[in-house]
Image: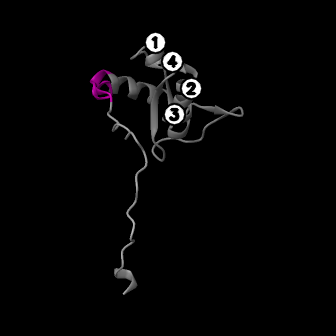
Amino acid sequence: MLKMLRPALTRFDDRRVKAAPKVANTIFETPEYKVWRDKVIRRAGGRCEAIDDGRRCYKALPTHRMFADHRIERRDGGALFDPDNGQCLCGSHHTAKTAAARAARR
C-alpha cells in the first residue's frame, strides 16, 4: 500500500534561467579535423601527454578516451590544424586544462 503513495510535492526548479543545450561545433565533424586528431593521438602513442609531479599520465587507449587538445586554444589564436599545436590528453586532464584556459581568459 505504501508503495502506491506518491510524494505530495513535486520537485521545484528554482533556476530562473535554464542553461542552453550544448551544441557541438561543426568543425569537429570535418575531415581535416579528424585527420589532425588522428595525427596528434597517434604521435603520442595513444597515451595522455600530461605531466603530473614529473610523471607522465598512465591513461591510454583503448582503456581510456583520449582527446586531441589544442595547446594554444583556438579561441586564443592557436593554429586549428597544426599538429605542433596539438597534444593528446585523457578526459580528466583535458577538462582541467580547458577550465584553466577559460579562467585565465576572465
The type of residue carrying mark 4 is: Ile
N-term mark: 1 or 4: 4
Earlier-in-chain disc, 3 versus 2: 3
**Up-down: is 84 above or below 7?**
above
> Disc 1 designates what residue?
77
Q: CA distance from mark 3 to mark 4?
A: 13 Å
Question: Relative to 10, does residue 77 appear above or below in the rendering?
Answer: above
Closer-to-camera residue (100/64): 100
State the image quarter where residue 17 is shown. top left
Discs 1, 4 touching: Cβ within 8 Å: yes
Horizontal and vertical percent position of residue 87: 50, 25
Q: What secondary structure is found at the residue carrying circle 4?
A: loop
Q: Alpha-carbon distance for marks 1 and 3?
A: 18 Å
State the separation of the CA atoms marked 1 and 2.
16 Å
Work out whether mark 4 precedes mark 2 in sequence or the reverse, and give the earlier one: 4
What segment is highlighted magenta in the picture?
A: 25-32
Q: Secondary structure at mark 2?
A: helix
Spatial separation of the CA atoms under disc 3 and disc 2: 14 Å
Q: Residue at x 54, y 31 (%)?
A: 99
N-terminal of the two: label 1 or label 3?
1
What residue would you read off at disc 3?
Answer: 94
Q: Residues within 10 Å of mark 3 (few under 14, many from 20)?
A: many
Q: Main secondary structure of the magenta part?
A: helix
- Residue 103's disc is 2
Q: Give percent across and percent down for residue 58.
A: 59, 41
Identify the element where label 3 is drawn: helix
